[in-house]
Every structure is written in C-alpha cells, then in structure tokens.
Image: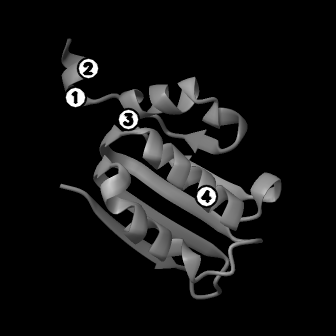
Amino acid sequence: MSSISSNISSDGNQGTIVVSGRFDFSIHKEFRDTYQSTRGTGMRFEIDLSSVDYMDSSALGMLLLLREHAGGDKADVLLRNPSSTVERILRIANFGKLFEISGVHVEAASAEA
C-alpha cells in the first residue's frame, strides 16, 4: 500500500512531500497533483523517502518531472532519508548529480544481518 501526504509552507517557498510504501506508477497522478499547483521555480521541495520500501523506474521519472517543475538545473530539491536500498537505486541512476540526497538510513533487517 502506498500513500502520499504533502504540505506547502505558509509563505509558499517550501513544499514537503512524504511518500510511504511503494513508490511506483500506481501513485503517479497523486504525486504529480501534490506539486503541480505550486509555482515550482524558486521553491524548495523536500521529498521524504524514509517510509519508501520499493522504488521503480517510474518513480525516478516522477522525481525528474518534479525537478523540471521546480526549475530544472536551478531546482532546489532534497531527497531526504532514503533507505539504503532506495539510496542504492538513486546512486545507480546518478541522481546524486541532479538532487541533494541526505540522511540515508539502514533498514532494521539489514542492520541485524
């Protein structure tokens, strides 16, 4: 099961999007709707990935579309707290060159192994 919640700051300068569960094509419309009504360019977007347990290539595409909405090369987008599995996917896709990524956390199962 997937879910998305979002919050735009009162001054409209920052948007936070929290994704939980599977980050895949099944939530593309909901994800797009969370940012599409904002001005985009000049805003800071923080995407909280701490509760994402699965991410596929469509999620990567959704993040790229958000980046474009936020100003492309001038975008200010932070991908926050991805699990080590999700961080690995982001690294393989070279997203560290396009996005700020912070706070990688290790899943409990991996930590116990």
Whether label 1 touches label 2, CB < 8 Å: yes
Q: In the drawing, does residue 96 fall left or right of residue 59?
A: right
Nearer to us: label 3 or label 1: 3
Q: In the drawing, does residue 30 fall left or right of residue 2?
A: right
Q: Secondary structure at mark 2?
A: helix
Give amino acid for label 4: Leu
Nearer to us: label 2 or label 3: 3
Image location (x, y in percent) of residue 96: 65, 34
| Residue at mark 4 | 65
Instruction: Quadrant for the C terminus, please.
Output: top left
Image location (x, y in percent) of residue 58: 45, 46
Lower sequence index among marks 1 and 4:
4
Lower sequence index among marks 4 and 2:
4
| Residue at mark 1 | 108
96 lies above or below 44 = above
Q: In the drawing, does residue 63 fall left or right of residue 72?
A: left
Does any portion of residue 81 appear in the rendered image?
Answer: no
| Residue at mark 2 | 111
Disc 2/disc 3 C-alpha distance (Å): 12 Å
